[in-house]
Image: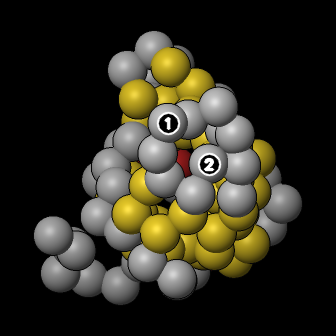
Amino acid sequence: MRPPRSPDLVADITLDPTLERGRRSGWRPNNDFGLLHDCDAHIEFADGSVQPGGTGRAELWLLTPELQAGRLREGFTFTLREGSRLVADGVVVQVLRSDLHVGA
């Protein structure tokens, strides 16, 4: 279920081509933004889903956005995992919350 607030980021997410199936909107993987712990996010793809090896534009709602305060910028790269398995790479296209943007 989509969180009851505006999204925090827009990102391009590229799924690993070896995945058995695609991913749909509502996906909540573990996101590695380079901290000592992961930052889960609710993800909604613009086209509803992305297939293995494909790239989709998505809105992200960070479940703990305060951990990213002042850290993010356009072009920032991150990885997405399910458990210990790397399943996708992401690139921030737009930071929608000003408090998350570098220099905020």
Q: Looking at the image, which is closer to me, 6 or 23? A: 23
Which quarter of the rendering shows the N terminus? bottom left
Position of 76 with respect to 15 (left or right) is right
Relative to 73, is 20 on the left or the right?
Answer: left
Relative depth, front residue between 20 and 101: 20
The amino acid type found where label 1 is placed reads: Glu
Q: Secondary structure at mark 2?
A: loop
Q: Which residue is denoted by mark 2 in the rendering?
A: 52
Which residue is denoted by mark 1 in the rendering? 20
Q: Amino acid at mark 2?
A: Pro
Q: Secondary structure at mark 1?
A: loop
Q: Earlier in the sequence, mark 1 or mark 2?
A: 1
Q: Residue at x 71, y 49 (%)?
A: 53
Q: Residue at x 22, y 74 (%)?
A: 2
Which part of the image, by quadrant, shows the C terminus?
bottom right
Mark 1 and mark 2: span between their CA atoms? 7 Å
Q: Are marks 1 and 2 in contact (CB under 8 Å)?
A: yes
**Res. 4 image quadrant:** bottom left
Across and down, in percent, residue 70 comes to 62, 56
Residue 40: x %, y % from top left: 36, 43
Outermost right residue = 75
